[in-house]
Amino acid sequence: MLTVLKVGARNTGKGGQQAMNQTGASKPESPQSAAVEARTEARTENGPQENSRHQEKKRSPVRRFLGLLGPGLVTGSADDDPSGIATYAQAGATFSNGMLWTVPVTLPLMMAVQEICDRTALATGDSLGKLARRKFTRKPRVMIAILIVALLAANTLNAAADLMAIGQGMQLLGAGPDRLWSIVAGVGIAVVLMAGGFEIISKVFKWLCLSLLAYVAVLFVAKVDWGDVLAGVLGLQFRPSLEYLSLIVAVLGTTISPYLFFWQSADRIEELREEPRGGDHAIGLEEQSPGSGGHKLRNARADVFVGMFFSVLVMFSITAATAATLGRNGTDVKTAADAAKALEPIVGPAAKFLFAAGFIGSGILAVPVLAASGSAGLAGLLGKQWGFDKKPSKAPVFYLLLGVGTIGGVIVTFFTTDPIGLLILSAVINGIAAAPFLIVTMLIARDKDIMGKYRNGKLASTIGWFTTAVMVVAGVIGIWTTVTGTG
């Protein structure tokens, strides 16, 4: 996770000296020799990693399961940001269960794409932006840079929508004007991130996202027509209208969002840097022993798959719950309070408080992810330092982009009065932008020189390119409905 680095191999304190003494290694003369020694030790099968794996086996299955959750779970939680919540609620309220077929369709696509992004980082020890710099020549890199700049702009719009959602959540709690809290949240997040406090944000607020599971409970309390739900899941309620197709693009855009590609990669790199032998040079699987590498890959896949399953579970629950409540009366979701009404069958008047907690928690977690993903991608592509583990003086480009994205989101909040509409629009933009970044990712992931034996196999290639084709079609529809205003 993009966190402040804990004590690691790059520290030169007593613990590091003792570790070197125990292995009989002499004190490295330079950072380069230290990095070489770290990589040499990583290839040793019977090293501290093996002891760590042995200790892991002694833990209970539940603790082992919770221990492997990391970047994948954060990505899944960030995927259910206010943009996603608003989009799913709008889908259920407007078309009832008619869009539930997107749940079983998007799950394998999300799993495949995020696993590929995650594996590129694991295999190489480099972020997606830096890998694009390695893979492509100057002209393609310029085009990718332009695309990332466009992504930064889209992320700023998305961050603005999320900040407004945080404000609406605070207003639901009776804390004051939503616009004021949007500003306070944006400035506060920017200050915390600049001070290297993302670890606190990620640990505290991702648990608030669990409040969204209240929608699961609604399904067992509200009068749900399960036959109608099944028909929706099977795609029997598909409607060939432009409004319907436009909302499909929004659903795809908020589940297969391009900023999550960069985030998954960067977050995994930060986790590798936290390892005792990591430091500034994250150690890829190709430089580790086969046993250790295989163990890491299995754990990482489980982490990603669990995170994506959690994400679509929330997606299904919100859509079906709003269909069973708001959808019956054809309620149009215009505010956070409208979406909160879907929880009233189970918690009554307290629905707005529970929904507000989910909106606030998911928003505060998502804004840093939005700002950091594109910033890390562009910094890596330009060959610059990036990461919350570094001080602003060491990674000025990264922090400049981070500040622009966060504060820019605050500024955008002054120019719109329809946060739910902005949330859905940002989802459509993500749907349009996803295809180009998927193409870049797939070309990197199949490159044998970069990925070695960890390059895409037949299954990953098939699902990955199929997802790319789906998002190309979604992008075309999104552009058409946005330009013509027919969505």
Image (cartoon, rainbow, N blue to C red):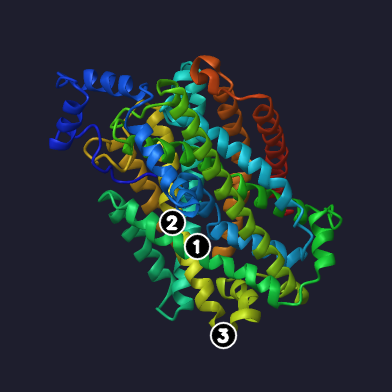
Q: Earlier in the sequence, mark 3 or mark 2?
A: 3
Query: What amino acid type should be assigned to the residue bearing mark 2?
Result: Leu
Dot 2, crowdedness within 10 Å: few (<14), some or many (≥20)? many
Horizontal side of residue 24 vs 180, given as left or right:
left
* Residue situated in front as seen by the camera: 370 or 6: 6
CA separation in Å, label 3 and label 2: 26 Å
Instruction: Examine the rendered structure and indicate whether residue 378 appears above or below residue 186.
Output: above
CA separation in Å, label 1 and label 2: 9 Å
Query: What amino acid type should be assigned to the residue bearing mark 1?
Result: Cys
Dividing the picture into quarters, in which one does residue 372 lie? top left
Dot 1: what SS?
helix
Dot 1, crowdedness within 10 Å: few (<14), some or many (≥20)? many
Determine which of the numbered discs, if any, sits on residue 349 in the image: 3
Q: Earlier in the sequence, mark 1 or mark 3?
A: 1
Looking at the rendered image, the disc whose residue lies closer to the viewer, 1 or 3, is 1
Q: Name the outermost residue toward the right.
A: 236
| Residue at 67 percent of width and 40 percent of height | 475
The picture places residue 119, in percent across and down from the top left corner, at 51, 31
Dot 3: what SS?
helix
Query: What amino acid type should be assigned to the residue bearing mark 3?
Result: Pro
| Residue at 69 percent of width and 33 percent of height | 463
Q: Which residue is mark 2?
A: 365
Horizontal side of residue 237 vs 421, given as left or right:
right
CA separation in Å, label 1 and label 3: 20 Å
Q: Are marks 1 and 2 in contact (CB under 8 Å)?
A: yes
Q: Which residue is mark 1?
A: 209
Query: Would residue 417 be visible to someone looking at this image?
Result: no
Q: Earlier in the sequence, mark 1 or mark 2?
A: 1
Horizontal side of residue 238 vs 66, given as left or right:
right
Horizontal side of residue 191 vs 439, given as left or right:
left
The picture places residue 298, in percent across and down from the top left corner, at 53, 36
